[in-house]
Structure formats: structure tokens, C-alpha cells
């Protein structure tokens, strides 16, 4: 099902009476502009700032002044070329007003984006059909402060020859375009706009005279049923009456439904009474629990008094002049809290320092243990060398011959293992002093052993100094 788009069209006059298709220029423009000089009851002034101003003028007064000045300039030239230099008629239609009014429920159900697209497409179609000439438009206002969005277009009434002639704009030809061509163009753009049924010469071509008469009468009846020519308030009142009638029928239906429901509830009354009796029995059973609850409440009150007494004592212990001065209690509590935080920070600092000292002590102990182990190894090695040297001395006591003896060779072998602090061996020193084939003397071997003992003694004194023993 499509939608209907109303398209009221009025010729606007500077002077003269308003009629079915004519209106006062100032009144119509001031109603459309920012001034919103409207008597429409559903106008909400608090929403007028939402209206969109799409034409050259947004204020009605500015548009009226501009149109009257334009008409005055036109009239100056008109007098020059008119018959007997006559002026324009005072009630001449100098402008035209259109209102694009889609079905209220439908347009309100559209998103703001779709509303914008609909009105833009509608304006483009009116321009495409030549009903509106964009260069002649002086005001284009989209109203969002009434029951449903709609758009006002105020245009100068220039005909195709450039003459101000509203009767050549608002005529049957224009209405035919609005009734048939406008809906078709809007349908091409995807809008479900219904065509407006009007007298169609093509439709009656092949009809008899009686059929033509019946067709015409039917159209007249439909036209009369649409209540054309009603004011906005009268139309709104008619709609309200229709809604009230619908509401009356709905209320009657609802009243019948409620009566049926009441009868049904009355039929269940006995069940309800039984439920009440059961509830009373349950209440009787709950009486002991209620008594216990009351006792618990009394106990809670006593505990509350105990807490109060404890707080009272605490305030006294804090030395406060007023035991009810909560501000002073908070200040002292904050002071104690700050002191506790400072003490806690000091403890943490000392704990951190002790942890550092412990780590250092562990590191020193580890290094000392390593040095002690090395010293013990060197001491044991020195004792072994001393033992070997003593063996050499014992063997050297029996040496009586030259250096080629087996005993000398054995002594030299042991002497090669004896190493002095400067890195030289006892054998190297011996050979450097006596050569490789000199007789080994007990005195030299003894001196070598003495040197070794001195070295061991020096090592022992170093260990004692570092506390390894």
C-alpha cells in the first residue's frame, strides 16, 4: 500500500481577501519563516530551532520585504509597457506557496536520513516538472516543530514569459501534474507515492454518456469526502473527531473485555477465599518466628548501645573536650595513621639496610671460603713437597760419589718438582750453580729444603693474617 502526499498550493496576494486557492502574502510567509506566526494548535515552539532553512531567506519579514521590493521594481517596468500605462492590480498574485505534506504516520516512521532524502527528491521532482523554478524560490522551510515534518516553498509567480501571473501557475494544468506526474516521478525514485485520482479525459474516451456521468459523479463524491479547503485547525479537529470515534469503539470493546474478565474473576472468588484462609493459617504458624524476630531486634538494640558506649569511652580516652565531636576524632585518627605510616616506612628502611648488609656478609663469606679452600690446597701441596724434600735429604746423606750416581739422578728428579716463589725450580738453581755433573752436597740439598720451608712458613703467616685458620 502506497502513501498519499498532500500538495496544497496558494496564490499569494499583497492585498485582497484570502480564498480557497489564494492567501495573504505577509501572513503565509510569516507563518512559514522563523517567526512561526501560526495558529496551528499542534505547533511546539520549543522545537522550532530544529526547523531547516533551505532557501535564500529564513525570516518571513525579510522575505516579504524582498518580494515587495522585487514586485515594486517589476511594476515600474510594467507601467512603461502596459496599455495606457496602467499599474498592476492590487490583488494580483505575485507569488505562490506550496506545502509538501506526506502522510504523518509514514513520515514520522522514517529515519532522519530518509526524511531528508524524501523531501530533497520531492523538491527535485517539482523543479523537473516545471511546477517550481529554483531561480524563483525565495523561501524553502522544512518544519519539524509540528505533528509531522512538512516543507513550505515560497516562489515568485513568474510565467514562462517572465510576467508575474499567479493564475498561470495555480491552474488545472499544474494540479494535473501534481496528481499524476508527481507520483510517477517519485515512484521512479523509489518512493511509494499513490497517484491522486482526478478526471482523466483518456479514461472516458470509450464510455457512454451514462458511464461518463457516473464516472464524474463518483469523482465529485470522492473530492467532497476529502474535505478540501479546510483550515489546518479544522482539518486537525476533523481528524481528532475520527480518532475519538475510533477510540470510542475501542473503549467499548475494552469495556466488554473487562466485563468478561471481571465475571471470570468473580467465579474464582471462592478459590481466593480459600487462599486467604490458608494464608491466615500460615500467619499463625509464623507467629513464633515473629516473636523471635522481635527478640533479635531488641538484642540488636542492646549491641548498638554497647557500640555507642565503646565509642564514647574511646573519645574520652582520646582526651577530647567534646565526646560528640566527630571532626576532632577524625583529625586525631588521621594523625595516628600518619605516625604509623612513618614508623612503617622507617622499619622498611631498616629492613632494607639489614638485607643489604646480610647480602654483603654472605658475599664476603663466600669469597673467604673460596680463599680458605685455595689456601688449604696450597698448604697440603707444600707439606707434600716438604716430605719429598726430606726424602731427598735422607738420600743425599748417602751420596759419596760423583753426579752420575743413581742417587743424584733421583734427587734431581725430586728437585724439579720444588718450585720457588719466583717460579724457578730447585733443580734449575742447582744446575745453574754447580752444573749438571757436579757432586751433590748435603749442604746444598739442605739449603734447598730450607728455602722451601721458608716459603711454606710465609704462606702460613699469610693465611693467619687473613683468618683462614
Image (spheres, rainbow, N blue to C red):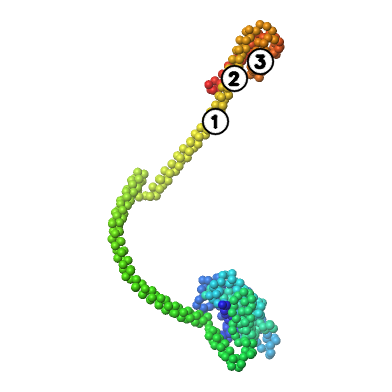
Which residue is outermost to the bottom? 209
Which residue is the site of mark 3?
413
Using the rendered view, name the quadrant where residue 65 is placed: bottom right
Residue 334 image offset from top left, x and y in percent? 42, 46
Which residue is the site of mark 2?
381
Asked whether 398 or 435 is in front, the reply is 398
Residue 307 numbered mark, or none = none
Q: Using the numbered discs, state the Cα–Cα distance from disc 3 to disc 2 in whole angstroms.
A: 17 Å
* Classed neighbour count for the residue bearing mark 3: other residues with Cα under 10 Å, few (<14), some (14–19), many (≥20): some
Asked whether 185 or 44 is in front, the reply is 185
Q: Is mark 1 on a helix, strand or loop?
A: helix
Asked whether 25 or 204 is in front, the reply is 204
Q: Is mark 2 on a helix, strand or loop?
A: helix
| Location of residue 248 with respect to 416 vertically, above or below | below
| Location of residue 114 with respect to 446 vertically, above or below | below
Left or right, 300 with respect to 209, comes to: left
Residue 391 image offset from top left, x and y in percent? 61, 12
Residue 42: in sight, yes or no?
A: yes
Q: Going 59% across and 21% down the picture, which residue do you hit? A: 378
Q: Going 40% across and 48% down the picture, which residue do you hit? A: 330
Left or right, 309 with respect to 74, comes to: left
Using the rendered view, name the quadrant where residue 115 is placed: bottom right
Residue 80 image offset from top left, x and y in percent? 69, 86
Tell which circle, 3 or 1, labels the residue nearer the N-terminal end: 1
Asked whether 441 or 132 is in front, the reply is 441
Left or right, 281 with respect to 397, comes to: left
Q: What element carries label 3?
A: helix
How many labels sit on residues? 3
Q: Going 40% across and 45% down the picture, which residue do you hit? A: 332
Which residue is the site of mark 1?
363
Amino acid at each position: 500500500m502506497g502513501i498519499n502526499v498532500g500538495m496544497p498550493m496558494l496564490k499569494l496576494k499583497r492585498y485582497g481577501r484570502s480564498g480557497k486557492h489564494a492567501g495573504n502574502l505577509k501572513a503565509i510567509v510569516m507563518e512559514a519563516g522563523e517567526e512561526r506566526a501560526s495558529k496551528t494548535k499542534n505547533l511546539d515552539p520549543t522545537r522550532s530551532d530544529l526547523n531547516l532553512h533551505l532557501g535564500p531567506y529564513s525570516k518571513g519579514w525579510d522575505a516579504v520585504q524582498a518580494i515587495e521590493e522585487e514586485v515594486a521594481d517589476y511594476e515600474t517596468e510594467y507601467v512603461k509597457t502596459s496599455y495606457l500605462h496602467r499599474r498592476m492590480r492590487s490583488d494580483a498574485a505575485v507569488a505562490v506557496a506550496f506545502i509538501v505534506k506526506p502522510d504523518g504516520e509514514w513520515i514520522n516512521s522514517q529515519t532522519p536520513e530518509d526524511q531528508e532524502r524524501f523531501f530533497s527528491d520531492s523538491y527535485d521532482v517539482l523543479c523537473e516538472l516545471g511546477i517550481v523554478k529554483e531561480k524563483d524560490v525565495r523561501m524553502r522551510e522544512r518544519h519539524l516543530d509540528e505533528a509531522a515534518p512538512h516543507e513550505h516553498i515560497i516562489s515568485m509567480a513568474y510565467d514562462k514569459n517572465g510576467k508575474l501571473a499567479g493564475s498561470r501557475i495555480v491552474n488545472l494544468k499544474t494540479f494535473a501534474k501534481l496528481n499524476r506526474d508527481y507520483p510517477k516521478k517519485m515512484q521512479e525514485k523509489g518512493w511509494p507515492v499513490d497517484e491522486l485520482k482526478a478526471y482523466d479525459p483518456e479514461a472516458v474516451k470509450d464510455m457512454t454518456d451514462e458511464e461518463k456521468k457516473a464516472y464524474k459523479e463518483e469523482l465529485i463524491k470522492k473530492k467532497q469526502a476529502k474535505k478540501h479547503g479546510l483550515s489546518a485547525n479544522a482539518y486537525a479537529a476533523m481528524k481528532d473527531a475520527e480518532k475519538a470515534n475510533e477510540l470510542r469503539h475501542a473503549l467499548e470493546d475494552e469495556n466488554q473485555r473487562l466485563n468478561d474478565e471481571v465475571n471470570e474473576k468473580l467465579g474464582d472468588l471462592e478459590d481466593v477465599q480459600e487462599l486467604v484462609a490458608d494464608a491466615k493459617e500460615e500467619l499463625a504458624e509464623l507467629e513464633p518466628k515473629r516473636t523471635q524476630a522481635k527478640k533479635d531486634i531488641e538484642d540488636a538494640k542492646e549491641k548498638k548501645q554497647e557500640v555507642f558506649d565503646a565509642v564514647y569511652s574511646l573519645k574520652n580516652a582520646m582526651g577530647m573536650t567534646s565526646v560528640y565531636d566527630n571532626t576532632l576524632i577524625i583529625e586525631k585518627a588521621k594523625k595516628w595513621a600518619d605516625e604509623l605510616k612513618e614508623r612503617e616506612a622507617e622499619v622498611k628502611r631498616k629492613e632494607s639496610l639489614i638485607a643489604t648488609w646480610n647480602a654483603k656478609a654472605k658475599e664476603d663469606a663466600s669469597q673467604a671460603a673460596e680463599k680458605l679452600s685455595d689456601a688449604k690446597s696450597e698448604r697440603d701441596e707444600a707439606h707434600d713437597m716438604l716430605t719429598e724434600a726430606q726424602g731427598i735429604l735422607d738420600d743425599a746423606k748417602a751420596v759419596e760419589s760423583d753426579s752420575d750416581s743413581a742417587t743424584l739422578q733421583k734427587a734431581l728428579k725430586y728437585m724439579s718438582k720444588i718450585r720457588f716463589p719466583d717460579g724457578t725450580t730447585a733443580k734449575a738453581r742447582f744446575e745453574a750453580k754447580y752444573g749438571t755433573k757436579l757432586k751433590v752436597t748435603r749442604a746444598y740439598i739442605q739449603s734447598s729444603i730450607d728455602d722451601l720451608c721458608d716459603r711454606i712458613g710465609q704462606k702460613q703467616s699469610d693465611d693467619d693474617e687473613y683468618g683462614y685458620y
